[in-house]
Amino acid sequence: MEQKHPLPPFTVETAKQKIQLAEDAWNSKNPEKVSLAYTSDSEWRNRNEFINGRTEIIAFLKRKWAKEHEYKLKKEYWAHTENRIAVRFEYEFRDEKGQWWRAYGNENWEFDENGLMKKRFASINDLAIQEIERKL
């Protein structure tokens, strides 16, 4: 049985550990590695896109990081319950035309008993920035 520690029920400490693991994985920009944190039938809403399962997660992330150059993400703890975690995040990237962007958002995560994320709902807003305005 696949497991991704820490497992629910979460404490503040283990929720923050889970968030840091997610941040590190996403900053690796390795779609296959990232996908292993999710159940094989994981459900996502990312902006206006609905994604189901690891195969779709990998395809989505490959498309995402092919367009988002110099991607850097920071996640922060917002709240948690026994098997759910809420985070706020921001990330920065440069598009194909050289324009820098900062994306702000919130994610709601739900985990199964093995610590794999079975639901991820992300609301995201983008802001065009100048390179000198970068924070990450």
Image: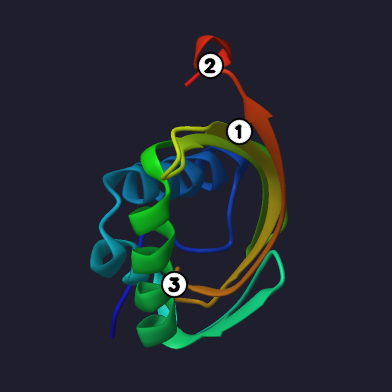
Task: Give the residue at x 42% y 47%.
Answer: 68
Image spot of residue 75 (x, y percent): 55, 38
Image spot of residue 106 (x, y percent): 72, 49
Report which residue position mark 3 lands on: 60
- CB atoms of marks 2 and 1 within 8 Å: yes
Examine the rendering and report whether any part of residue 40 can be seen. no
Task: Give the residue at x 72% y 71%.
Answer: 48
Rendered position, 104 above or below 119: above
Q: Tell me if mark 1 has few (under 14), some (14-19) or many (20+) residues whose alpha carbon lies within 10 angstroms of its own.
A: many
Query: Marks 3 and 1, Cα distance to the nearest angstrom?
Result: 19 Å
The quarter in which the N terminus is drawn is bottom left
Rendered position, 110 above or below 106: below
Residue type at the position of mark 2: Lys
Examine the rendering and report whether any part of residue 72 can be seen. yes
- N-terminal of the two: label 2 or label 1? 1
The answer to which quarter of the image holds residue 82 is bottom right
Query: Marks 2 and 1, Cα distance to the nearest angstrom?
Result: 9 Å
Numbered disc 2: secondary structure: loop
Numbered disc 1: secondary structure: strand
Q: Residue furthest front?
A: 97
Please state the total of marks drawn on the protein image: 3
Task: Give the residue at x 27% y 46%.
Answer: 28
Query: Marks 3 and 2, Cα distance to the nearest angstrom?
Result: 26 Å
The answer to which quarter of the image holds residue 87 is top right
Numbered disc 3: secondary structure: helix
> In front: 81, or 24?
24
Report which residue position mark 2 lands on: 135
